[in-house]
Image (tube, rainbow, N blue to C red):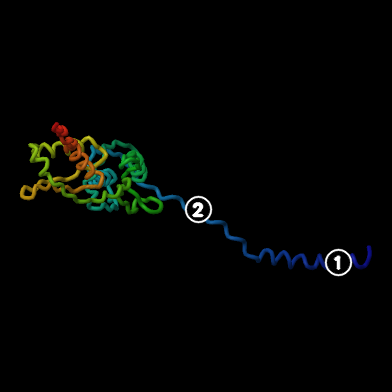
Amino acid sequence: MPRFLSCLLLAVALAAPALRAADEAAPSAPAPAPAPSAPRLTKFNLDFPGGTPGELVTAIQKATGRPLNVIIRTEYLGRPIPALKLSGVDAAQLFAALSLASSHYERVANNYGMARFGFRTDGAPSDSSIWYFFVEEPPQPPAPVQFSEFFLLTPYLDRGLTVDDIATAIQTAAKMRTDLPPPTITFHKETKLLIAVGSGEALGLIRQALDALNPAPKPAEAPAKTPPAQKQP
């Protein structure tokens, strides 16, 4: 065996115990911590005949035998909740189902929007979660701009029409326009003025009614022609 190879084997043999001892002394990597499990919620049975959000919370607390942290805004206290009969559920399951069951579309003006209500919480639900009651409704269209206008009724009253006749015609036309809020009208006796307040389109109905009640002027009669004077012989 060559001298160089013999020296190399001898060095490895001498270093092996030191390497083994260093490896045994080195700290081992810590085992990964187990993932935290989701908190278990109290299960209960519920037979709720229907009522308000506060009454539902009271029924849940009675069924679970423990308090429920809930925030309900004053304007939502009277919101009706349907009857519920459930078995082996927890608060998170109940509130998720209530939100889905209440979802529906409502018509607003010429569009449809989603509406729903229920209870929500932030973070993972637990028995100590703070729930809040919410109501979602489609946005309402802006109110139409209101205008005021005055109509002199003397020409119509002088022809024998009454204020009730004119008002009835205007109100009938307004009722037929189901998509248009009717104008508000009142008659001022001293000035014979019909005072109206409403949207521009609603006031247009009043103008159309008065135009229809105003008879077209009669054509002027041509003056009678006089025969030419006869010449004296």
For the N terminus, the image quarter is: bottom right
Residue 74, x across and y down, in percent: 22, 52
In x, y percent, where is residue 196? 16, 47
- Dot 1 surroundings within 10 Å: few (below 14), some, or many (20 or more)? few
**Residue at x-position 20% and y-position 39%:** 211
The circle on residue 8 is 1
Instruction: Give the amino acid at mark 2.
Output: Ala
* Residue nearer the viewer, 207 or 41: 207
Identify which amino acid the numbered label 1 is placed on: Leu
Q: CA distance from mark 1 to mark 2?
A: 50 Å
Label 2 belongs to which residue? Answer: 35
Q: Residue at x 10, y 44 (%)?
A: 154
Q: Is residue 226 visible?
A: no
Residue at screen point 61% across, 61% down: 29
Indicate the position of residue 119 as horizontal and vertical percent values.
Answer: 32, 47
Identify which residue, 2 or 102, lies in the foreground: 102
Q: Is residue 13 visible?
A: yes
Q: Is residue 39 left or right of residue 161?
A: right
